[in-house]
Amino acid sequence: MKKKLTTVLAIVLVVALSVAGTYAYLTAQTDTVTNTFTAAGLASSFSLDESQANQQPDGSYTLNLNERVQANAYSVVPKVNLAKDPTVHVTLEKNVGAYVFLAVDNNLGDGLTATIDRGNWTALNTTYTDAQGVEWTMYYKQLAGSENPAQVDINVLAGQQIVVGDTVAANCGNIVFNAYLTQSAGFTSALDAWNNSWGK
């Protein structure tokens, strides 16, 4: 009996030592870091317009800078240049750069010359044929991103006029402008941006 008791006590003692020697793992946890993603905007405003042109008694035109319109009609007098100020207005979103593309469909008749302001615009060296079959000549201007973006006004025509020669065709034709905007980041060039966004 004494031997059995000793055995039992020994077993109890081993169990007690095992319990006393058991500890929880050492652990710690950081605060969470949450990342939220939203699509960036490109521009808070983007437009193309020109001043209202008003003909004067001598056949010339003056521009009403306070009245912006989408179209003007002119009565052409030989050797009297036509005031015209198509302008692209852009206000980019914060820290977003962009390419502004200018498309020109020039159907002016003989004797009328419109020259693109090359101080503002660079030839894209491509044309664009739209769904209606109109072939546009393309130009571009790159705008850098800014922490505090402001409106940029980009003049289209050199001298803000159409030059009229000594003689003009009976049908003086027309000239049409359009503008497009694409992010500059992620593209290798303006042509790459155009081909992968609008020029497809």
Image (spheres, helix red, strand yellow):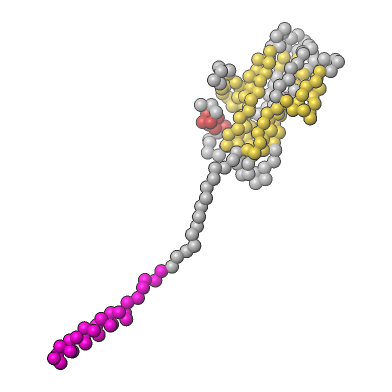
Query: For residue 177, what is the image quadrant?
Result: top right
Residue 145 shows in the view: no
- Residue at 39% x, 71% y is 26
Q: Quick one: which residue is furthest to the bottom in this view?
A: 2
Q: Does 25 lie within the magenta span?
A: yes
Q: Position of residue 35 (x, y in %)?
A: 51, 52
Quarter containing the N terminus: bottom left
The spot of residue 142 in percent (x, y) is 62, 35
Vertical placement of residue 187 versus 82, above or below = below
Tell me the quarter of the picture where residue 83 sits: top right
The answer to whether any part of residue 137 appears in the image is: yes
Q: Is residue 50 magenta?
A: no
Up the image or down, 21 lies above or below 118; here it is below
Q: Residue furthest right?
A: 57
Return the residue found at the far front: 1
Q: Residue extending furthest top?
A: 170
Q: Which residues are magenta?
A: 1-27
**Residue drawn at the location 52% of the way across and 47% of the way down:** 37
Q: Nearer the viewer, residue 127 or 1?
A: 1
Q: Tell me if residue 38 comes above or below residue 21 in the rendering.
A: above
Q: Is residue 39 above or below residue 66?
A: below
* Quarter holding residue 181: top right
| Towards the viewer: 80 or 27 | 27
Residue occupying the point 58% across, 17% down? 134
**Magenta stretch: dominant secondary structure:** helix
Expressed as whole percent of the image width and height from the top left, the position of residue 184 reads: 57, 37
